[in-house]
Image (cartoon, helix red, strand yellow):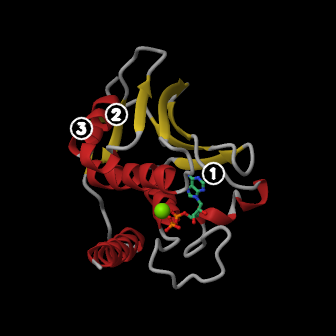
Amino acid sequence: MLQDVTQLSDNINRILNLARIQSRNYKGNFSIVDINQAVKQFLKNNNHVFQNCEINIHNPSGRSFSCRIDLSLFEMLLMNFLTNAVKYNASEKPKIDITFEPKKRELHIHFEDNGIGFDKNETKKIFRKFYQAGRSDNMSAKGSGLGLHLVQNIARIHKGKVIAESKGIGKGSVFTLILPMGFGD
Ligand SMILES: Nc1ncnc2c1ncn2[C@@H]1O[C@H](COP(=O)(O)OP(=O)(O)O)[C@@H](O)[C@H]1O
Ligand SMILES: [Mg+2]
């Protein structure tokens, strides 16, 4: 019961956030942020949500990355990526690897999970509003099919994008957020 109420309020918040972001006069609250630090802090603050999982951050270049972001939208995006990685996961211990990869003036942040993955032909569809792979009953209280649509809108507002990849069902997924860089770094 309590879980259903939480789920419902999560869904309502998603709808409100989406409407807010898509409204023409949405300006956002942007500032230059150390992304590595922001992700670490987010995981620390939300430790309780991911207690049963193993989340590792990898930064092979050893650099720190400054991007111009709206921190609360960025955190919303992180929450959607990470909760999906745990939710669509049949492993005993969900594992998520977050990797920072600089590419010219872009920062690619990969979120790789050991979850159920998805079929190649779902790659585009999963970003659609209300779309949930393998579900015909979209009125189910569990999830909304809005998370990735919201994520895509958040990426756009940052002049970035998101890419979804999976080697197939049962083979995990990689979601990549691409953000423009070059602000004071
Ligand atoms: N990490 C993931 N691994 C496998 N499938 C995923 C993952 N993230 C999202 N999906 C698929 O994409 C669909 C849409 O995701 P989302 O928009 O967050 O909606 P919801 O989580 O509410 O179902 C999900 O229903 C699921 O089928
Ligand atoms: Mg979701």
Q: Most extreme residue toward the left, as rendered?
A: 45
- Tell me the amino acid under the disc marked 1: Ile
Horizontal side of 110 relative to 5 (left or right) equals right
1 or 3: mark nearer the eye: 1
- Tell me, for residue 116, which label it has, or none: 1
In which quadrant of the rendered image does the C terminus lie? top left
N-terminal of the pair, mark 1 or mark 3, is: 3
Residue visible at 49% across and 29% down? 99
Tell me the CA gap for discs 2 and 1.
28 Å
- Tell me, for residue 35, which label it has, or none: 2
Q: Residues within 10 Å of mark 1 (few under 14, many from 20)?
A: many
Q: Position of residue 140 (x, y in %)?
A: 51, 81
Asked whether mark 2 and ligand 1 are closer than 8 Å, the reply comes as no
Q: Position of residue 181 (x, y in %)?
A: 43, 33
N-terminal of the pair, mark 2 or mark 3, is: 2
Ligand number 1: quarter of image: bottom right
Q: Position of residue 9 (x, y in %)?
A: 29, 76
Say whether marks 2 and 1 touch (CB < 8 Å).
Answer: no
2 or 1: mark nearer the eye: 1
Label 2 residue SS: helix
Q: State the count of labels.
A: 3
Query: Quarter of the image holding residue 17?
Result: bottom left
84 or 121: which is nearer to us? 84
Tell me the CA gap for discs 1 and 3.
26 Å
Residue at mark 3: 44
Asked whether mark 1 and ligand 1 are closer than 8 Å, the reply comes as yes
Label 1 residue SS: loop
Query: Quarter of the image holding residue 157?
Result: bottom left
2 or 3: mark nearer the eye: 3
In which quadrant of the rendered image does the N terminus lie? bottom left
Asked whether mark 3 and ligand 1 are closer than 8 Å, the reply comes as no
